[in-house]
Image (cartoon, coloured by chain):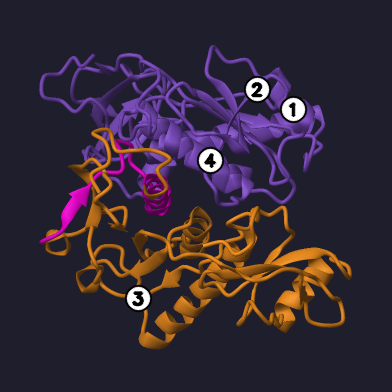
Chain colours: A purple, B orange
Amino acid sequence: MNDIPGEAVLPDGRGGPHVFVADASAPVLDDGDHHHLARVLRLRDGDPITVGDGAGRWGRAVFRSSDEPELTAEVVVVAEAESTVAVGFALIKGGRPELVVQKLTELGVDRILPLTAERSVVRWDDTKASAQVERFRRVAREAAMQSRRVWLPQIDEVSAPGEVVVAHGLAVAEHGGDPIDGSVRALLVGPEGGWTTDELVDHRTVSLGQTVLRAETAAIVAGTLLTAIRDGRVSPPAGPTA
Amino acid sequence: MNDIPGEAVLPDGRGGPHVFVADASAPVLDDGDHHHLARVLRLRDGDPITVGDGAGRWGRAVFRSSDEPELTAEVVVVAEAESTVAVGFALIKGGRPELVVQKLTELGVDRILPLTAERSVVRWDDTKASAQVERFRRVAREAAMQSRRVWLPQIDEVSAPGEVVVAHGLAVAEHGGDPIDGSVRALLVGPEGGWTTDELVDHRTVSLGQTVLRAETAAIVAGTLLTAIRDGRVSPPAGPTA
């Protein structure tokens, strides 16, 4: 839904930097974001920005160096996406999980699930896991602002692959699995050593191609293909199945 | 072409680490690779490896800690790929060009072109540019071993987008361009500020989707989609056009 005739449906970066606020109708910048806009991006009074609540509502505004931004138009309400895609990825020793979260957010993945795996598992206690998830959420927020997303991705708590619950279309990435198709809505990517047989039980397996990918690359490929299929930019070879 | 009945056409990582040598028929490891296999991967006498020349010829061998590896089978000659894909990416200040080269190599991109762009250009003199290209080639070699590629990607010298010569299918990535399709064989990705009008002259433009991507992410997305279309894992929405 788009309340402003002729207005872009989504921020495309031409309307200035994008920043998240609690209420897009009455935007209040937090101190860190205000500092970033004023000091890092060097915005001046009157420069255009877009503000969004990360849940689909956003609008155009102008930056004020000493005050809150002023909206310049009605807030646009974006309709809920028709379908969402999710990517899970195994936390591995020496991995770059922040890179994965950043890239999946930029790509437009709707839900990101950090996973433990039996092979190459990172052993975190609850305190450490909570701190990491908080860190992932900050990374996702920054990446979503940078890429002008109106929806913040959901970042799940750390879980085992067997605990993952999705509405439909769950599959795990595995060498030699089926080709990816439109029925896959949530894809779990394992460590480089692969999933164990126990972890694969009852899961459909999907291949990400013939090359041997690092775990972090496999997660980015999963996000690229799922969002491209969701958005109709490419199709599975046999045509869409969902 | 595959000389050994029942043998895998490509190394898949189950035959041990993959290492590049000058001649796959008479493999001699360089000191750095020997050290890596022995000290980092902790291989022992008799452990399986695969050796390849990076130009399509590879074979299975066993590691010898004090000597050259011994081939365990006839060298397999891999037929030349039917079609190749290329990705160019603009060098930008604060960018992570090594990350881009690593990921494009893992994805199976055949040719990688580091580019200068009018916006956000990195100003390198010839000495610095040569050193960087050498660095990119080392990164690609490591990534190709890690991902068990039998073809090393070609890494071009740094050039301007207008100087790029490809046999066919050249396009530049640009917001609002055509959807990607099978006729695109070489895609040039610009800096976050985009290409200038001059740089776009005479080039077909192709869109990588509606989201605003960092330059490094856009290059990885280009590589993911071009290789997936090349390998028949996905199709453009209207079906293959090449």
Q: Chain of mark 4?
A: A
Q: Tell me the quadrant of the picture where the N terminus of chain A can be found.
A: top left
Give the alpha-carbon distance from disc 3 to disc 2, as whole Å: 46 Å
Q: Are marks 2 and 4 on the same chain?
A: yes
Secondary structure at numbered mark 4: loop
| The stretch drawn in magenta includes residue A61 | no
Residue drawn at x 44%, y 31% as measured from the top left: A226
Q: Which residues are magenta?
A: B202-229
Q: Are there few (<14), some (14-19), or many (20+) residues within 10 Å of tag 4?
A: many
In the picture of the structure, the residue carrying the numbered disc 2 is A203
Q: Quadrant of residue A225?
A: top left
Q: Is residue A212 above or below residue A67?
A: below
Q: Is residue A122 above or below residue B46?
A: above
Q: Is residue A20 left or right of residue B3?
A: left
Callout 3–callout 1 Cβ contact below 8 Å: no
In the picture of the structure, the residue carrying the numbered disc 3 is B158
Secondary structure at numbered mark 3: loop
Residue drawn at x 65%, y 56% as measured from the top left: B7
In the picture of the structure, the residue carrying the numbered disc 4 is A208
- Please state which amino acid type lies under the numbered disc 2: His
Residue B228: percent from left, percent from top: 42, 45
Viewer-proximal residue among A5 and B100: B100
In the picture of the structure, the residue carrying the numbered disc 1 is A199
Residue drawn at x 42%, y 54% as measured from the top left: B216
Q: Chain of mark 1?
A: A
Indicate which disc, 1 or 4, sits on the residue closer to the N terminus.
1
Give the alpha-carbon distance from disc 3 to disc 1, as whole Å: 45 Å
Q: Tell me the quadrant of the picture where the C terminus of chain A can be found.
A: top left
Secondary structure at numbered mark 2: loop
Q: Nearer the viewer, mark 3 or mark 4?
A: 4
